[in-house]
Amino acid sequence: MGATAESAAGQSSGAARLGLQAGQMVQEFGYDDDVDHELRSGIESATGNELVDEDGEEVVDAAIFWWREEDGDLVDALLGVLTDVAEGGVIWLLTPKSGRDGHVQPAEIEEAAPTAGLHATSTVNVGRDWTGTRLVTSRGSRR
């Protein structure tokens, strides 16, 4: 496989690993210059919709949240995202891989998620520099 084919396969597989489906609305939080633009494009291709920016007010099926160590309080941030995600929706917390600037220790995510009423179910490689942790609401945590 050539470099171009590998790049295209990596783009689609990163988005595919998130399990997003055609027609779903996905809201994006934490956008900055360092995000993976190929992953963003792959998500838009998979869902057939543009990403909703963090100021959007509609209820969405899923959220992606680019999060770096220096971004602040993870619990507060996750609670803010929860208000926009539909019941049964998923939040993908995207963090820099180990050794990259802004890397977040997995223990920090494991501690913050339950406090925000979430449960980490899996972690996947979504790009060259980013890892995705799938967060879902814990049973009985929604009001």
Image (cartoon, grey):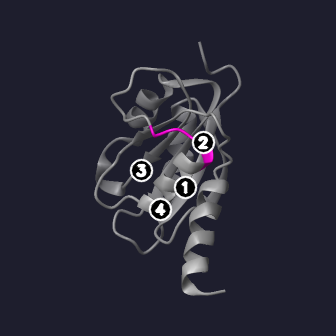
Tell me the residue at 58%/51% (across/down).
133
Q: Disc 1 or 3, which lies upstream in sequence?
A: 1
Q: Which residue is tagged 2?
A: 47
Helix, strand or loop status at disc 1: helix
Q: Are marks 4 and 1 in contact (CB under 8 Å)?
A: yes
Counting from the top left corner in percent of width and height, residue 50 is at 46, 40
Say above or below: 100 vs 37. below
Quarter of the image for residue 7 reads: bottom right
Q: CA distance from mark 4 to mark 1?
A: 6 Å
Say above or below: 41 vs 1. above
Q: Which residues are magenta?
A: 46-51
Q: Which residue is tagged 4?
A: 38
Closer to viewer: mark 1 or mark 3: 1
Q: CA distance from mark 3 to mark 4?
A: 14 Å
Residue type at numbered disc 1: Gly
Counting from the top left corner in percent of width and height, residue 32 is at 30, 53
Counting from the top left corner in percent of width and height, residue 1 is at 66, 86
Residue type at numbered disc 3: Trp
Q: Which residue is tagged 1?
A: 42
Q: CA distance from mark 4 to mark 2?
A: 14 Å
Could you say which is closer to the camera, residue 28 or residue 79?
28
Q: Are marks 3 and 4 in contact (CB under 8 Å)?
A: no
Q: Is residue 119 left or right of residue 115?
A: right
Tell me the residue at 41%/59% (across/down).
37
**Residue 23 within the magenta-colored segment of the rendering:** no
Q: Disc 3 or 2, which lies upstream in sequence?
A: 2
Could you say which is closer to the camera, residue 26 or residue 50?
50
Q: Disc 2 or 1, which lies upstream in sequence?
A: 1
Helix, strand or loop status at disc 4: helix
Q: CA distance from mark 2 to mark 1?
A: 9 Å
Residue type at numbered disc 2: Thr
